């Protein structure tokens, strides 16, 4: 059991690999903004080192990193209040990542479903980085001694592994140094599904652009994608149990609830009995009112590249004030000789 009390600190990350979408917004970004409003330190990261675990075109990677930073700010993150960073600009992430490569076990990594999904049939041809991905993710979090990590449902297994790594390190070295981080998976849309197929997660890699609402979509594109979203012929139920076995209906109701900061029960109390012909325009209006201003602001910020780069440089400086001492102390615990003998 951990005896030390760690100061609450929030960390989360998103990969700059293009196509930021509504799932990222509702599962992650919107939650990041909620945490920023609380009286707690918040650090949000563009995880470019994670992105290159699969091939990234260098020109696209730069563009996607800046676009993601623009998305963070357009969604409501304030670079003065939150620390916004690009992972590769804070070298302690990769340095602690190496240490955790030596703590984590091959068997733990082999169980990771994201690796199995991303590596596909030809796992022998996957990069070593893709296999070790969760050890670097644990380092991202623990190099800040972060206590809370807001993410979508798909990251739950990685966060359990983060706790396993912290526990093994603490146990092996007989210390109480790394906290047991809490995953924060909450809200009505922790798993947003494809608009074309309610059994598939909304994903940046889906070949169908109609399957997702991109943060760069304008009002017309957003409304059109919602009008075309797959549904079933039944009217909406008045209670949540009526959504069982109706994945497309459930998804659209979840999206509505999350965008409007309501619970699914509250939404169904209002819209139960309505046909999709009536509900879809309501959802389209809501989505346009919440999402279109974000895409407009993102487009504006993308013209201010120097400003984005300055924000990331400043973010990295602030971040390193936290990460450098934690890495130094980690090295000392492990027995590495360094400039400041502790
Ligand atoms: P990624 O783009 O894979 O780096 O994901 C960034 C964040 O968005 C993570 O917290 C994910 O859990 C979250 N996320 C990605 N896809 C979805 C989705 N379809 N529904 C909810 N959250 C998602
Ligand atoms: N693995 C996360 C994803 O694919 C991204 C990520 C990397 C992350 N490091 C993190 C999320 C640390 C939370 C905390 O979505």
Image (cartoon, rainbow, N blue to C red):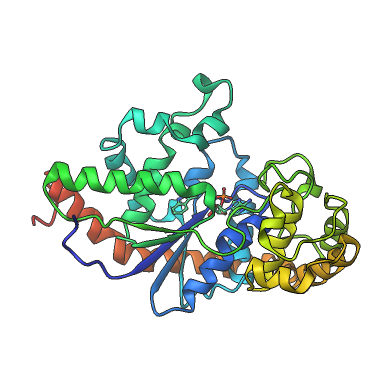
Of residue 106 and residue 1, the one placed in the foreground of this image is 1
x, y percentage for residue 119? 55, 28
Residue 336 visible to the viewer:
no
Rendering quarter of residue 266: bottom right
Residue at (26, 38) in percent of width and height: 103
With respect to residue 121, does 100 lie above or below?
A: below
With respect to residue 16, does 184 lie above or below?
A: below
Assign the C terminus to one quadrant of the image. bottom left
With respect to residue 66, does 165 lie above or below?
A: above
Residue 37 left/right relative to 141: right
Q: How many marks?
A: 0
Rendering quarter of residue 260: bottom right
Residue at (11, 47) in percent of width and height: 174
Residue at (77, 50) in percent of width and height: 195
User: Residue at the right extreme?
Assistant: 277
Of residue 70 and residue 292, the one placed in the foreground of this image is 292
With respect to residue 58, does 280 lie above or below?
A: below
x, y percentage for residue 325? 23, 61
Residue 53 left/right relative to 96: right
x, y percentage for residue 256? 72, 66
Assign the N terminus to one quadrant of the image. bottom left
Residue 274 visible to the viewer:
yes
Residue at (67, 61) in percent of width and height: 240
Of residue 58 and residue 212, the one placed in the foreground of this image is 212
Of residue 78 and residue 60, the one placed in the foreground of this image is 78
């Amino acid at each position: 059991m951990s005896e030390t009390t760690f100061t609450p600190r929030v960390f989360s990350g998103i990969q700059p690999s293009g196509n930021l979408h509504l799932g990222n917004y509702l599962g992650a970004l919107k939650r990041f903004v909620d945490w920023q409003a609380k009286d707690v330190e918040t650090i949000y990261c563009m995880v470019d080192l994670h992105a290159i675990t699969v091939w990234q075109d260098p020109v696209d990677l730069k563009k996607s990193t800046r676009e993601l930073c623009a998305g963070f700010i357009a969604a409501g993150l304030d670079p003065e209040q939150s620390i916004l960073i690009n992972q590769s600009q804070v070298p302690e992430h990769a340095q602690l990542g190496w240490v955790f490569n030596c703590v984590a076990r091959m068997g733990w990594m082999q169980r990771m479903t994201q690796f199995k999904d991303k590596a596909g049939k030809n796992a022998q041809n996957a990069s070593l980085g893709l296999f070790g991905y969760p050890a670097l993710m644990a380092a991202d979090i623990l190099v800040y001694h972060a206590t809370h990590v807001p993410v979508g449902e798909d990251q739950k297994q990685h966060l359990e592994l983060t706790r396993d790594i912290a526990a093994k390190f603490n146990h092996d070295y007989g210390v109480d140094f790394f906290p047991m981080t809490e995953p924060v998976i909450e809200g009505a849309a922790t798993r947003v599904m494809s608009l074309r197929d309610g059994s598939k997660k909304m994903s940046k890699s889906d070949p169908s652009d109609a399957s997702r609402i991109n943060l760069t979509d304008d009002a017309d594109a957003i409304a059109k994608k919602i009008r075309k979203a797959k549904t079933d012929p039944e009217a909406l139920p008045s209670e949540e149990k009526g959504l069982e076995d109706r994945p497309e209906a459930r998804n659209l109701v979840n999206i509505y609830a999350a965008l409007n900061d309501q619970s699914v029960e509250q939404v169904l109390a209002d819209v139960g009995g309505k046909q999709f012909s009536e509900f879809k325009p309501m959802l389209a209006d809501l989505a346009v009112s919440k999402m279109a201003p974000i895409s407009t602001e993102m487009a504006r910020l993308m013209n201010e590249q120097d400003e984005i780069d300055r924000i990331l440089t400043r973010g990295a400086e602030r971040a390193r004030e936290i990460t450098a001492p934690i890495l130094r102390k980690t090295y000392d615990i492990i027995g590495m000789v360094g400039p400041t003998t502790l």
